[in-house]
Structures are given as structure tokens and as C-alpha cells.
Image: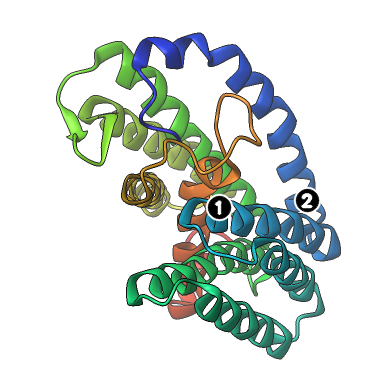
Amino acid sequence: MGDWTPPDKRFSELPRRLLTALVLIPFALFAVWMGSWWLALGCSAFCAVMLLEWCRMSATPNGALLAVIAALFGLGLGTGDERIGAGLLAAAAVLAVFSAQRTAEARLSAGFGVVYVFAMVFGLYVLREGPWEGRLAAMYFMSFVWASDAAAYFFGRMFRGPRLLPKESPNKTWSGAIAGVIATALCGYVAASWQDADKLPWMVAGVLISMGAQAGDLFESGLKRRFKVKDSGTILPGHGGLLDRVDGLGAVSLLSTLTFLSVPSLPRLLGL
């Protein structure tokens, strides 16, 4: 999320933020709940918009063409054919790198942006469609990220206190970060009750999800600071760009997917 807005203005933008969330969240929940091609269609739209925002933010040329490839990548996830995704990823990365200015830094930024956006979309799709109870896993983890964001936003501005990373994200505070972790630990406790699973693994998962979401948010803030922009875009009133809104969720989705694939017993431990 955009971290460089003055705190008083951020509160004045709260109605717009809530209205945007009321539109965006049901769309995301519907796509994830339905899964399969519905989710692939949502991933296609998100991937195209996010890559276009990255191109504008990093001054990478051929943004429209790269957005088309990104949209095809999202749709390609619905086929289940990894070769399609790999081919589109390679095509987008090559196009971005060779379209960028002839400096190592510009080409690295262009190529990284493609991998960064595609990886987040891939992580969400596979989390939902993986060999576990993907619908439940995705729904739980999405709600945990939103709970972490909300707790950090409101409690951070209520208690303020020392800043988490003043240079990278001056509006993030330790009080907000701790509130986010506590909120997701409580979410984990509730989820464990619903899943009839051990409380401790779910509470630990909640803490790790909050930490992963906040790390993804801070990472995005660092990228925006590098490119000297406040927001990645303007598509979401009160939030900025789509990248600003899904940075934490994208990080959690990718990390959760990689963890589940690496440790197959973990979903069973969580009752998933």
C-alpha cells in the first residue's frame, strides 16, 4: 500500500479505501471460491494490470504488449500445462529486458518486474488449485492478510510510536506491525477451531502469514522508493495501484505455495 501519504490525509481517504475494498474483495473472493477458469480469468486481469503498472513505474517500454502476454499467462494457468506458463514467462522476460534502456540496471529492473508479477499470480493460482484443500487454504490465507493489514492500519495510527523502517516506509510503525501479528494469531486460533486441528500450528501459521504480508508490503515500498513514486498506479481510489494493494497477498501466496509443495505434510497438519 502507499506508505508515503501523510497520516492525516490517509484517514481522510478512509471512505474511498473502504468503498474500493467493498468492490475489490468480493471480486477476489468469487474468483478464488470458483477456482479453475474463473480464477484464471481473474489472474489474467490482475497480472496484466500489475505488469502494466510495473512498466510505467520502472519506465520499461512496450508496456501494452507485455500486459497482453501477462494476460495470456494468467489464462494459461487454467490449462494446467506448465510449458505454456514457462514459455510466456520467458517471452515476457526477454521482451522486457531487450526493450529496456541499454544499461544493466534498467534491464535488470525490467526482467525482475516480469518475474515478480508472474510469480505472485502463479502463487495465488497454485495455492487455490494445489493438491490440498485449496479453496479453504486460499480463503483462510487471504482473510489473514486482510486482517493483518486492517489491524496494522488502524492500531498503528491509534498508538503510533517508533517507526518500523523510517527510510523505506515512514508510515509503518512497530505498534501496527505487532497488532497485525496478534490479529492473525487470533485468526489462526479461530481457523483451527473450524478445521478441528491443533491450535498451535495454525497460530504459528497466522503469525508467519502476517510477517510475510508485511515483508511483501515493505519490499514493495522499497521498490517504489527506488523508482521515486508514491503509488504504483491510480486504478484503485484510496489505495493507489493494484500492486500497492496485493503486494502482501502476493508474497504470502507464493511463500505458502512453495512451503506446501516443499513440505507436503504441512497442509494435513493444518487440516487442509
Q: Nearer the viewer, residue 35 or 13?
A: 13
Q: How many marks?
A: 2
- Residue 50 place in picture, x, y as percent: 61, 54
Q: Position of residue 51 (x, y in %)?
A: 60, 59
Picture quadrant of residue 203: top left
Residue type at the position of mark 2: Ala
Figure coloring: rainbow
Of the pair 158 and 190, the residue shown nearer to us: 158
In this rendering, would 69 be left or right of 109?
Answer: right
Element at label 2? helix
The correct choice, above or below, for 240 with respect to 137 in the image is: above
Residue 21 numbered mark, or none = none
- Image quarter hosting the C terminus: bottom right
| Residue 10, position as x, y percentages in the image | 44, 17
Spatial distance from mark 1 to mark 2, Cα to Cα? 27 Å
- Crowd tier of the residue under label 2, counting other residues whose Cα lies within 10 Å: few below 14, some 14–19, many 20 or above: some
The residue shown at (63%, 56%) is 52
Give the residue number, with chain letter if any, for mark 2.
31
Decide if residue 7 is in sight here: yes
Query: From what the image shows, is residue 147 above or below residue 252?
Result: above
What's the mark number on residue 56? 1
Q: Residue at x 67, y 26 (%)?
A: 20
Kindly tell me whether residue 194 is visible in this rendering.
no
Q: Nearer the viewer, residue 127 or 6?
A: 6
